Amino acid sequence: MPTSVHLPKPLLAAVDRRARALCISRNRLIVKALERELSLASDWSAGFFEALTRVDAATAAAVDRMVAEVRAARRSKAPRVL
C-alpha cells in the first residue's frame, strides 16, 4: 500500500547512503528498519523501563554492591593463555 512519509533531508541522505551500501532499495531499507523496530518494541510491555527507574534506595545500593563485586572478581582473573 503506497504511503507518504516526510523525512528531513539529512536523514533521507543517510538512508540513501545506507541503502546503497547494502545494495538494497531505499524502500526495502525503511521496511526492514520498521519491521525490526516493531519487533523489538513488542518484546517489552508498556511502562517496563519506567518501572525499572522506580526502585527503593536499598535495592539501588544492593545493585551497586553487586556490580562492584562482579567488577572486582573479573579484574582478579589471570589472563587466558592463548
Image (cartoon, grey):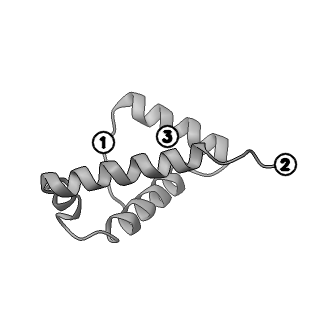
Is residue 1 at least partly visible in the picture?
no
Name the residue beneath numbered marker 3: 15
Q: Residue 79 carries which label?
A: none
Give the CA separation, mark 2 to mark 3. Answer: 44 Å
**In the picture, residue 76 is in which quadrant?**
top right
Q: State which tag comes first along the sequence, 1 or 2.
A: 1
Q: Earlier in the sequence, mark 1 or mark 3?
A: 1
Residue under the image location 35 percent in, 71 percent down: 43
Seen in the picture, residue 34 relative to 75 is either above or below; the reply is below
Mark 1: give few (<14), some (14-19) or many (20+) Cα within 10 Å: few
Q: Which residue in the structure is indicated by mark 1?
A: 6
Task: Left or right? Give the position of 62 relative to 20.
Answer: left
In this rendering, would 67 be left or right of 23?
Answer: left
Residue sitting at x 58%, y 51%: 25
- Residue named by callout 2: 81
Mark 1 vs mark 3, foreground winner is 3
- Cβ–Cβ below 8 Å for labels 2 and 3? no
Percent x, y for residue 31? 46, 59
Left or right: residue 81 compared with residue 22: right
Q: Which of marks 1 and 2 is in front?
A: 2
**Residue under the image location 23 percent in, 50 percent down:** 61
In which quadrant is the N terminus drawn? Answer: bottom left
